[in-house]
Every structure is written in C-alpha cells, then in structure tokens.
C-alpha cells in the first residue's frame, strides 16, 4: 500500500515537472502574451490592493495598542455650539473616580486636541514648531502603553515639579529632532516660555489615539495654562461662569476633552450605568444654561470604537474611497475580460497542438492540467509584481488623498496579502482557466485541427468573444463618464465665486504663544506690520483677521434685543473678529451701512457687521439690519452690539457649502494684538510672498511667522477629495480606454485571421475591397454601439447614487456620456481599421490556397 502511494506521488511529481518545463518553453515562445498577462495581473490586482489598503487604513483604522478592540470613545451629550463630543475636566475627574472604584476593571482617560507651540532646546539653541497634546496622567496606563525609554505619565505628574512639567516624546520626534539621544531623559526644554522636561519616550509604533494626527509629545492636562495650550473648545458661555483667561481644568462649563475608555468584554452595561450617574451634575448644568433641558437630562453615554471615532478621515473619506474601490474593481474586470479573450485566442491558435496530443492519447483533463500549470506560472509572476505595484501605488494614493502633515501609514499585513491572493486566484480561475476549459470540454475548438489552422470558430465561440468585448466597452464608457463628471465637479468648484477675491489674497499667520511677546508688545507690533506691508509694491490693501478662511471660524449663540428667543429665526452664527478695512481688503461687497474703521476702538460703542444670510434669518427678508442691536447672551446682554453694516454672503468654510450666517466683530474691541494678516495683491499673491516676509522681518527679526499662503491654495486644500477622485478616475478611464482598444483590436484581428478564406471566397465571387472593409467595420460598430448604450445606462444610475460627491453637474451627466461615447467610438474605429484594412486587402488565391 505504501509502495503504491509512493509511486502515485512520484508519478504526480514527475508529471508536474514535465508540465512545468513544457509551460516555461511555451511561455518563452510567446513573450508578448506572457508579458501582457503578467502586466495585466500586476496592474489590476496591485491597484485594487493599494486602494483596499488605503480604505482599510483610513476608514477602518486600528490603534497601535494592546487589545485595541476594548478601547471606546464616550458619546453622551453634544456641546451647545459646535455640536462636538467634548467634556470638561471636572466631569472627567468624576467619571475617573467612578471607574477607579469599579470592580469590573473599566478605566477612563482624557485627551485634548492637538495644538502647536514653540519648543526651545537650550542645549542646541534651536527653536522649533512642535505639536503637543494634553492628556490625563492615566492616559498611557489605560492604553497599556509603557515607555520605550524613561517613563510615561503617572498620577504624581498632575502637579508641577521643580524641573517643570513632564513630557513624553513620540519615538519619531525623538529620532528626528534629538538624533535618538539615549540621554534625553531628564533634559529640560522650554515650551511657549514654560519649562518642561523629558520624562520618557513612547514606543516606536505608538502615534497616539487619533489616526493620521500624531503629536510630537504629550503633557499632563494640568499644564494647560502654563504652556499656553490653546486648542478647540466649546462652552456654556459667561453666564455659566466661563472665563477664557482662567485655567481650563477648573471650569465645569468649559468643554475641551475627549473621553476614551478601556472596557473589558461584559463590563459595558455596568460601566455605562455608573458613568451616567456620575455625569448627572453636568446634565443639569447643560439643562440650565444651554436650553433643551429635556434633551440634556435624557442624554446617556454610549460607546463607539475609539479608532473610527477618533479618526478625522473616517467619515470624510469613506464614500470617496468606496467609489474608488468600485472603479478600480471595474478596471480589473476590464483587464480580466481582456485576459479571457487572450486565453480564448491562444487556445484556438494551439488547436493544432491539442489535436496532435489528443491523437497521441492525451485526455482533455490532461490538456487542461497543462494549461493550469501555465496559468499558475503567470499568476505567480503577476502576483509578485502586484505587491510591488500595490506598495508604490499605495504611497502615491496616500500622498494624493491626505494633507502633507498627515502621519497616517499603510500596513501590509496578512489581511492585505490574503485580499491580493483572493483577487489573483479569482482573475486566473474565471478569466484564464474557465475559458480554456469551456473551449476544450465544450468542443468549441475547430474540428480537424490536424488539417487546417484557419478554420473559423463556431458561432457560439464568436458570440461569447463579442459579448465580452461589449462588456469591456460598457465598463469603459462607465469609467469615462464618471471621470468626466468628477473633472467637471472639480472645475466647477475651482471657478466658483466665493464672494471674495480669493485669487488675489495672501494670508500671513503668526504664533505669539512665546512669553517674549506680551499683550503690550503684540498690540504695538500689528500697526507696524500693517504699515510696512502696505508700502510694498504690488499690495492693494492689508487688514487683520483673527482666523482667516477657509474652515477657521467658530459658532457663537445669537440673541437680539426686542426679539424673543422663541421668535428668533437664528439661534447661532459663525463669528470672526476682523480689523478696519477688512471687507475692502477681502473683496467682499458692502450692501448697506459701513465697515469697520479706525474709530472702532475699545472705548467706543461696540459694533458689528453681519452678512446677508444672517440678516435674512434673524430679521426676515427685506428687513434692514442696520441699527438693530444683538448680543451673544440673553438680556441684558442681547443689546451689546450695534449692527452698522451688511455685506454679501461669502463661502468662508469651503466652496461646496452655501454661505453660513456670519457675525463680524471689530478686532480692536474684542482681541487686540492677535490674528493674521490678509493682503490683497495686484497680481498673483505668491509673487510677493518673499517680499512680504522680508518686510515683516524688518519690523521684528524674531517674528514667529508660521505660514504665508495664498488664499486660493488654502481653498484648494478643501478640495483634496474632489482632486483625488478627478485624478484617479481620469487615470482609470485612460487605462480602460487603452484596454478596450487593445481588446477590440485583438478580437477583430483574430477574427479576420480566422476568416481569411471567407474573405478570399467573397472577393472571388465579386465583393469589392470597400465592401469587405465595411463588413468588418460594421461588426465593430455593432459591438461598440451595444457597449456605449449599456454604459450610458449604468453611468446614469451610478451618477444618481453619487450626487453627494458631484457639484454643478445637472444635465451635464448626459454631456459626459456623449463625450465618452464619442471618444469610445473614435477609439473603436481606429482599433478596428487595421484589421478591416487587412481583410479588405486579402488576395483571393492566397486565401483559398490556405484551405
């Protein structure tokens, strides 16, 4: 029995060895076929793997900590203005005490948003911009993340020591800025004028809990005021006792922390119940000062996956990446249809060989086994190259998709390799092996393979090839139509009138957190800077803006004197503090009244300017807002500001969103000595950026300039999704077009070669060359017309489901389809002309002699 089994294994291995050797010889004989299949598999599978890896890393990220599935973000009640899931530090402390006393081992930590600061190293004498994040002292213990060097934060770090506040460095930051100095622990640094010291270095792979956003170091929450941390926040306002200049950590109505919890399996219900009970005082505070008392009192905590909830990209990029995944899958399908046609052609061309092997006793399964070995060799080469393509394409996609300062990385783990292997196996099985099996087992090969090598394939085989070709054209039309619509979307948004002169504006941003710039010094600097820049050639106007667009404003509650809260059509608006001459500098037209001027000083009457949407929603259509009084608090604070001007609506958030109600307050009356410069130029703003920087350095050589950027470039940053879709769909559509042309050319060339005798007979019976030419072109036109019609239907259906990603298309979807149809028709004619020309110039006697 064992001897017989050994003989069978030996026989099997010998046959495989023979098949492998023969397959290598066959593939060497057909280098174009071999290279085409390998390149098609590498590009198709590699592109799909790259998009899949990006989709998984952006939309379904994981945190680099032990048991990341146990980490959750607490969502209980949204903040009153920004509708964010932020909480006060006193609320966090109550919840932490509850978790500490719990027996189910749940734990809760807190962290702030990221903020930038000036970090000075006395050893090197250098000052650099660095990103900080404030965290609770149990942050690293909750994440179960020890230090790679030194120590992480502990409960004793809640108070400042004699050497300053402790900081834990990110591993990459330690390598880049401190050359991986092993003696870094204990070194003192200066952050925004406050002394800190390095307590330790985090593990190599730990970037924090916000995928794509990595702080350079972590500090205790209690260091907030000393290090001048200023990040996103929300509050219940002055009525609730909020003071922006006071430490954040003692204010119950000041919301700036995200709560993250580690909850073991089975402990969620008990933990949530205890945290809900501990949060009761905060719900009462919301109910008292934020309104919506019933909603606030009824709110309860829920747990959401920390990785997805914390990611700033998950929700924003989910739909675009799924669209790209679908489109790159279509591209792979087009490529595989080409593979199927190539395989059919190759099997038919080798019919003479198969007939000889059958005559010598080879069975059909034995022939199929030989083709299987050949396909496996091609798949092995294509699969290896696909991983290289996936890595290169993945890096390019990451660069195109996200901002330059994004620290997201792609991980090629077992899941990615399994996905790639599955695609490769499906491509080879369905588009290489099955077509060959159908031809061999279905008797679709030419009969009489020993006597004729030009006999036509049966009609069934021809119809199958034509249907696959029509499917290729259908999918190509679909990709071309969608690419055209995404390109139009990007063009429409770039040409959008935002209500301001964004093509001639330059913004200069500063960071005055350093202790060397106190309020008095900053207030004296701004007039000097404005005067110096105003005198530069090419400058039309200069003004102050506390937070230049886009996406740099904050929501604030709105009250109006003489209008009850129930009768108000507007409860909140976006706010910005701007300087005199701001609207003229921005190119924003004044509809009524006046804009801010030099007379709007702190001691003068408090004034405001609103946009048209604000006036319509608060006072009603046609009502003149000039002279009305408004405020940010309930009476008597609802009459603090006198409206002196109304301006046009401007898209200050992004180009897609319609203009939001805007409230502008005078910078000099709100926050003098802060903000950015907006500079309106005569020509392209980038042309004077260098002279602006030089002029500002003349005012103060140490001026902390963080960024000089044209406003148009800032708006372009909000269009990364649209640019990504336009760029990649255009690339995919061009590849699909090339593949469709190759497929059409290949099928028609093969058909013409198989029908040589038919064309010779037709011409011998009196058919002209033009008739033969028209015969072949007509066949091509029928296939193309069928594909174009089907592609147009699919494009219309898909475009309707993608309306959220399109902008200003309207009936342009039909135009996109007509454009795609025209392009495909031209390409089809060009691809079909050469085979048709060869058919029309067939010599009758030579063709008949082949038979």
Image (cartoon, rainbow, N blue to C red):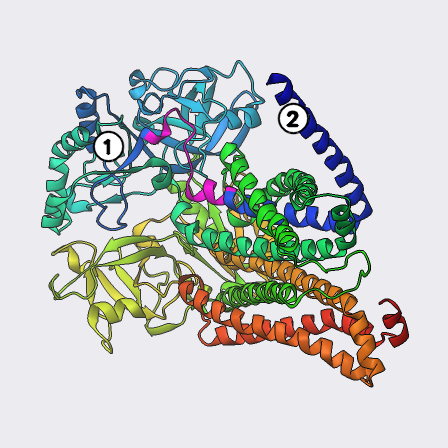
Range drawn in magenta: 53-69
Q: Is residue 56 magenta?
A: yes
- Asked if disc 1 and disc 2 are in contact, CB closer than 8 Å, the reply is no
**Badge 1 density bin: few <14, some 14–19, many ≥20, Cα 10 Å:** many
Mark 2 secondary-structure assignment: helix
Give the residue displayed 11% in from the left and 45% down from the top: 298
Q: Which mark is residue 152?
A: none
Q: Is residue 283 left or right of residue 644?
A: left
Give the vertical position of 514 relative to 7 (above or below): below
x and y, in percent, of residue 800 in the image: 41, 67
* Quadrant that contains the C terminus: bottom right
**Badge 2 density bin: few <14, some 14–19, many ≥20, Cα 10 Å:** few
Report which residue position mark 2 lands on: 8
- Which of the 4 quarters of the picture holds residue 395? top right
Residue situated in front as seen by the camera: 398 or 837: 837
Mark 1 secondary-structure assignment: helix
Q: Is residue 113 left or right of residue 472?
A: left
Give the vertical position of 768 relative to 297 (above or below): below
* Quadrant that contains the N terminus: top right
Report which residue position mark 1 lands on: 89
x and y, in percent, of residue 181 in the image: 56, 17
Q: Is residue 173 left or right of residue 823?
A: left
Comparing labels 1 and 2, the label whose residue is closer to the camera: 2
Give the residue displayed 44% in from the left and 33% down from the top: 215
Q: Is residue 221 visible?
A: yes
Residue situated in front as seen by the camera: 79 or 465: 465
Q: CA distance from mark 1 to mark 2?
A: 74 Å
């Amino acid at each position: 029995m064992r001897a017989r089994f050994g003989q069978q294994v030996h026989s099997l291995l010998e046959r495989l060895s023979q098949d492998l050797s023969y397959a290598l010889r066959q593939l060497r004989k057909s280098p174009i076929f071999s290279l085409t299949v390998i390149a098609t598999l590498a590009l198709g599978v590699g592109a799909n793997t790259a998009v899949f890896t990006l989709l998984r890393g952006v939309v379904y990220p994981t945190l680099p900590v032990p048991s990341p599935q146990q980490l959750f973000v607490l969502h209980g009640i949204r903040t009153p203005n920004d509708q964010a899931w932020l909480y006060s530090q006193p609320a966090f402390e109550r919840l932490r005490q509850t978790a500490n006393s719990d027996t189910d081992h749940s734990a809760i930590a807190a962290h702030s948003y990221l903020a930038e600061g000036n970090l000075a190293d006395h050893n090197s004498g250098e000052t650099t911009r660095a990103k900080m994040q404030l965290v609770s002292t149990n942050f690293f213990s909750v994440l179960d993340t020890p230090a790679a060097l030194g120590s992480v934060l502990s409960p004793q770090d809640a108070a400042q020591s004699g050497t300053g506040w402790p900081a834990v460095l990110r591993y990459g930051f330690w390598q880049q800025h401190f050359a991986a100095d092993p003696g870094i622990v204990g070194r003192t640094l200066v952050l925004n004028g406050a002394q800190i010291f390095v307590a330790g270095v985090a593990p190599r792979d730990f970037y924090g809990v916000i995928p794509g956003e990595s702080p350079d170091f972590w500090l205790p929450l209690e260091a907030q005021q000393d290090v001048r941390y200023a990040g996103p926040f929300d509050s219940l306002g002055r009525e609730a006792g909020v003071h922006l200049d006071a430490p954040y950590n003692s204010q119950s109505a000041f919301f700036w922390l995200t709560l993250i919890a580690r909850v073991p399996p089975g402990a969620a219900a008990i933990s949530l119940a205890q945290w809900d009970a501990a949060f009761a005082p905060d719900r009462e505070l919301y109910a008292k000062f934020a309104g919506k008392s019933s909603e606030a009192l009824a709110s309860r905590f829920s747990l959401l996956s920390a990785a997805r909830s914390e990611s700033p990209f998950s929700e924003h990029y989910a739909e675009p990446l799924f669209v790209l995944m679908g489109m790159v899958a279509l591209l792979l399908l087009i490529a595989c249809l080409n593979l199927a046609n190539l395989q059919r052609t190759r099997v038919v061309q080798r019919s003479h060989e198969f007939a000889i092997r059958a005559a010598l006793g080879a069975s059909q399964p034995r022939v199929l086994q030989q083709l299987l070995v050949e396909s496996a060799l091609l798949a092995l080469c294509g699969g290896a190259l696909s991983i290289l393509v996936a890595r290169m394409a993945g890096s390019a996609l990451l660069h195109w998709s996200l901002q330059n300062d994004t620290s997201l990385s792609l991980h090629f783990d077992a899941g990615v390799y399994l996905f790639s292997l599955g695609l490769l196996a499906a491509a080879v099985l369905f588009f290489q092996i099955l077509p060959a099996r159908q031809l061999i087992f279905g008797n679709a090969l030419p009969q009489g393979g020993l006597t004729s090598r030009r006999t036509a394939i049966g009609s069934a085989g021809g119809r199958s090839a034509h249907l696959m070709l029509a499917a290729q054209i259908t999918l190509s039309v679909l990709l071309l139509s969608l690419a055209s619509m995404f390109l139009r979307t990007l063009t429409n948004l770039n040409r959008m009138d935002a209500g301001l002169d964004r093509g001639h504006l330059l913004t200069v941003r500063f960071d005055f957190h350093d202790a060397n710039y106190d309020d008095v010094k900053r207030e004296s600097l701004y007039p000097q800077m404005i005067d110096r820049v105003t005198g530069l050639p090419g400058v039309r106007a200069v003004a102050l803006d506390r937070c230049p667009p886009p996406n740099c404003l904050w929501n604030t509650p709105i009250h109006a004197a003489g209008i009850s809260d129930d009768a108000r059509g507007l409860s909140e608006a976006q706010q910005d503090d701007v300087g005199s001459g701001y609207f003229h500098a921005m190119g924003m037209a004044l509809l009524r009244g006046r804009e801010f001027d030099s007379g709007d000083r702190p001691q003068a009457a408090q004034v405001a300017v609103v946009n048209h949407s604000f006036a319509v929603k608060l006072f009603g259509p046609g009502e003149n807002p000039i002279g009305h009084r408004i405020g940010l608090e309930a009476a008597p604070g609802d009459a603090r500001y006198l409206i002196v001007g109304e301006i046009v609506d401007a898209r200050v958030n992004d180009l897609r969103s319609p203009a939001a109600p805007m409230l502008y307050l005078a910078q000099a009356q709100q926050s003098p000595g802060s903000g950015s410069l907006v500079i309106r130029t005569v020509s392209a703003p980038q042309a004077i950026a260098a002279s602006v920087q030089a002029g500002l350095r003349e005012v103060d050589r140490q001026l902390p300039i963080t960024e000089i950027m044209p406003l148009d470039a800032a708006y372009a940053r909000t269009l990364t999704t649209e640019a990504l879709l336009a760029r990649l769909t255009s690339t995919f559509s061009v590849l699909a077009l090339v593949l469709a042309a190759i497929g059409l050319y290949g099928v028609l060339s093969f058909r013409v070669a198989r029908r040589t005798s038919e064309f010779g007979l037709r011409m011998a019976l009196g058919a002209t060359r033009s008739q033969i030419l028209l015969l072949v072109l007509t066949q091509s036109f029928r296939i193309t017309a069928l594909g174009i019609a089907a592609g147009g239907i699919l494009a219309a259906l898909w475009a309707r489901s993608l309306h959220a990603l399109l902008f200003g298309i309207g009936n342009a979807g039909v135009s996109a389809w007509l454009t795609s149809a025209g392009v495909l028709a031209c390409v089809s004619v060009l691809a079909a002309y050469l085979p048709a020309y060869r058919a029309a110039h067939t010599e009758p006697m030579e063709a008949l002699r082949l038979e």
